[in-house]
Image: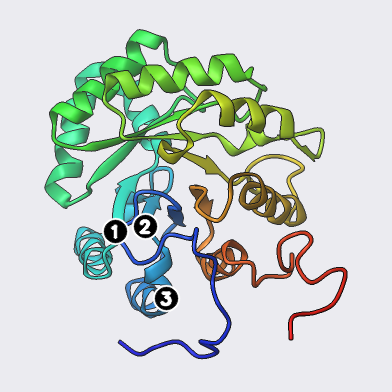
């Protein structure tokens, strides 16, 4: 392990350092990364990736030997893996609770460490959400409960209540749907402030939005990352980061990105000697 160049430039002390981290988590999306590409990517960015999410139902169409090797690569680089919630939604919609335990057991057999429980496309009652989370925990899986909607905007009070239900049922982390964080092409700052006040943000991951939300632009995604880091500090938990954006996200966390240094630093008055 070599040192880093430009060591005379200090990084913010409030940014958590080497893994394992309990805050300042970054979750990367894996929509079908090839094995060789994944290894090359993690060779550089692994120190800044805490979780990798196999999005939607992509785990189903991997050849099993490819999937097992990819999971082994993630373990080698100390990146925790989990399956995105829309796959479980599909299983629950088509097979009901009879399909949930076999799904969780298969995830464990393959070597996944966690699953996500969401209701983006298949609405869940509070009782159904609790039962899904409890079943996954009983199977030995870590659970990431997601709150919020891709289609309608939810009040902060409802999101907080749903998050508390997820934690009570056994979720380790709660993900806040990225679409909730943008309203009318603008960042939903009031919602974020209410969530900041009402939740333990160390156990909450804020998802980035993306092109799967109609009208979302790359500029909005970039602005949302900046806003989250500015509002919550460099140790905010950020989810749904594209693989090619992980390195830049870390650069933004430590103040070396295009957003520039923190407000008021070096922008007026004499420069340090």
**Residue 73: assigned label:** none
Nearer to us in this view, 254 or 216 = 254
Left/right of residue 230 with respect to residue 108 in the rendered view:
right
Work out how far the residue at label 1 is from the one at label 3, CA to CA, in angstroms: 19 Å
Residue 68 on image: x %, y %: 20, 61
For image coordinates 67% across by 22% down, the residue present is: 153
Q: Nearer the viewer, mark 1 or mark 2?
A: 1
**On the rendered image, what quadrant is the C terminus found in?**
bottom right
Callout 1: helix, strand or loop? loop
Left/right of residue 258 with respect to residue 204 in the rendered view:
right
Within 10 Å of disc 2 (Cα), the crowding (few <14, some 14-19, many 20+) is many
CB of mark 3 within 8 Å of CB of mark 2?
A: no
Instruction: Kindly indicate the quadrant of the structure image that contains residue 146.
Output: top left
**On the rendered image, what quadrant is the N terminus found in?**
bottom left
CB of mark 1 within 8 Å of CB of mark 2?
A: yes
**Residue 50: assigned label:** 2
Q: Reading the chain from its start, which is encountered first: label 3 or label 2?
A: 3
- Relative to 116, is 62 above or below? below
**Residue 41: assigned label:** 3
Colour option used: rainbow
Work out how far the residue at label 3 is from the one at label 2, CA to CA, in angstroms: 14 Å
Left/right of residue 178 with respect to residue 246 in the rendered view:
right
- Relative to 238, is 195 above or below? above
Q: Nearer the viewer, mark 1 or mark 3?
A: 1
Within 10 Å of disc 1 (Cα), the crowding (few <14, some 14-19, many 20+) is few
Q: Which residue is mark 1?
A: 20
Work out how far the residue at label 1 is from the one at label 2, CA to CA, in angstroms: 8 Å
Q: Nearer the viewer, mark 3 or mark 2?
A: 2
């Amino acid at each position: 392990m070599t040192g880093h160049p430009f060591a005379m430039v200090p990084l913010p002390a409030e940014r958590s350092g080497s893994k394992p981290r309990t805050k300042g988590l970054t979750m990367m999306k894996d929509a079908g990364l090839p094995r060789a590409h994944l290894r090359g990517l993690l060779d550089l960015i692994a120190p800044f990736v805490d979780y990798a999410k196999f999005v939607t139902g992509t785990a189903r169409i991997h050849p099993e030997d490819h999937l097992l090797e990819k999971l082994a690569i993630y373990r080698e680089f100390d990146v925790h893996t989990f399956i995105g919630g829309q796959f479980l939604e599909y299983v629950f919609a088509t097979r009901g609770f009879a399909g949930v335990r076999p799904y969780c057991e298969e995830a464990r057999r393959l070597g996944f460490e966690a699953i996500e429980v969401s209701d983006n496309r298949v609405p869940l009652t509070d009782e159904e959400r609790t039962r899904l989370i409890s079943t996954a925990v009983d199977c030995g899986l870590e659970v990431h409960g997601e709150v919020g909607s891709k289609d309608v905007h939810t009040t902060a009070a409802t999101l907080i209540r749903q998050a508390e239900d997820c934690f009570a049922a056994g979720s380790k982390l709660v993900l806040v749907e990225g679409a909730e964080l943008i309203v009318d092409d603008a960042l939903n700052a009031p919602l974020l402030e209410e969530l900041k006040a009402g939740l333990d943000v160390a156990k909450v991951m804020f998802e980035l939005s993306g092109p799967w939300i109609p009208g979302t632009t790359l500029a909005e995604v970039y602005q949302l990352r900046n806003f989250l880091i500015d509002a919550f500090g460099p140790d905010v938990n950020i989810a749904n980061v594209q693989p090619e954006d992980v390195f830049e996200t870390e650069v933004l966390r430590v103040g070396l990105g295009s957003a520039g240094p923190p407000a008021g630093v070096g922008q007026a008055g004499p420069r340090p000697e």
